[in-house]
Image (spheres, rainbow, N blue to C red):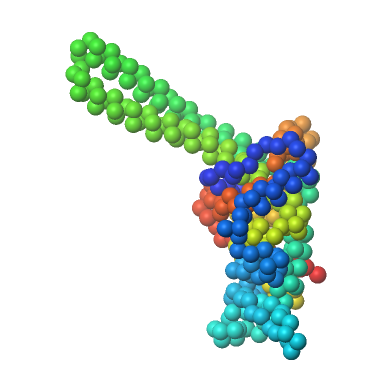
Amino acid sequence: MWWWNQERLHGELDMRTPIEVEQAYYAETETLLSPTGRQGNRSEQEPGQFNLKGTVYCGQCGERLIITNAKNRHGNVYPYFVCSGRHSGKTECTRQAMLIEDVERLIEKYYEMIEVSPGMRQDLAGKIHADFDLLMANETKELSRLTSERDRLDDERMKLLQAHYAGAIPIDLLKQEQDRIADQIGDIQHRIEAHHDEYASARANLDDSLGLLANIVSVYERADDANRRLCNQAFFHRIFIEEGGDVRVEYERPFGSLCDTEEQMNALNWAAEAKKKGEVQTGQRVVTLVEGLNLSHLGWLTGLEPATPATTTRCSTD
């Protein structure tokens, strides 16, 4: 099942080329992270100290990795990640210290492995939109019932008004009944609009997420620490660094589904079947989606179904 956020991401359709969109994205994020809100950049502090802090964990014992600085006899400072469990004696972990620069390279390589191709992006988008169309079809009966109830209440309101004009209902009773009907109609109208808005918002959120996933290597490579931190927080709940250099992650939604190889295979199969049946109608819509997005608005996505544990994926960066 695909997951969405109830709040719309601030993305919009854009007919510019990918390069133009990417340049606009970087200009937007630089404006977003003004000097008053920025906590340093890559020229002011060692790469990785800001953007990975609080996100990386020891792959051996699961405790958080913390920063320590080692100084050699020449006065040169080397920043390391060390296991907080071993450092505090909380665990019996034997994990060795890791240069922050090396960990940063591991994360960059991981993004290279999970970035999707334009073709895969289109197949995933097509499958997602087809799933939403099916969900909307299943909601048709409920929407029809709500609409009928709203129309019935409108008729009741008009009859009450006519009865009042005929002298059959006093003004105080008319007002009481009209208020009751207005409250019920307002509630029904809100539910009808919510049905449409939630699906539209969900589609847009997932399209924006796919746009980021298809361009994450370039975005991450050129971003400063503040924007890298936003990327890492959007994609990952936790990043575990193993002793041998492997990276294991717990994804944030919806990236757990979008990066899942089984889901991607399902999307490929769906696209192949749809093409045979002549049902592929999403291609034009997909290629015109915004390539970049304001990462600060990519919040934690909630789902159609009760929350499940975050997806865990292990990949070797060798």
Q: Residue 199: x, y in percent? A: 56, 38
Q: Which residue lies furthest to the bottom in this view?
A: 73
Instruction: Give the residue displayed 70% in from the left and 71% down from the top.
Output: 46
Q: Which residue lies furthest to the front in this view?
A: 35
Residues 273 and 176: in front is 176
Tell me if residue 168 comes above or below residue 290 in the rendering. Answer: above
- Apparent side of residue 193 relative to residue 285 in the rendered image (left or right): left
Is residue 82 at least partly visible in the picture? no
Instruction: Give the residue displayed 24% in from the left and 11% down from the top.
Output: 165
Q: Kindly indicate the quadrant of the structure image that contains residue 9.
A: top right
Q: Residue 185: x, y in percent? A: 38, 28
Instruction: Give the residue displayed 59% in from the left and 74% down from the top.
Output: 64
Q: Residue 252: x, y in percent? A: 61, 57
Q: Residue furthest top?
A: 166
Is residue 224 at least partly visible in the picture? yes
- Apparent side of residue 145 relative to residue 166 in the rendered image (left or right): right
- Apparent side of residue 71 relative to residue 200 in the rendered image (left or right): right
Tell me if residue 151 comes above or below residue 140 in the rendering. Answer: above
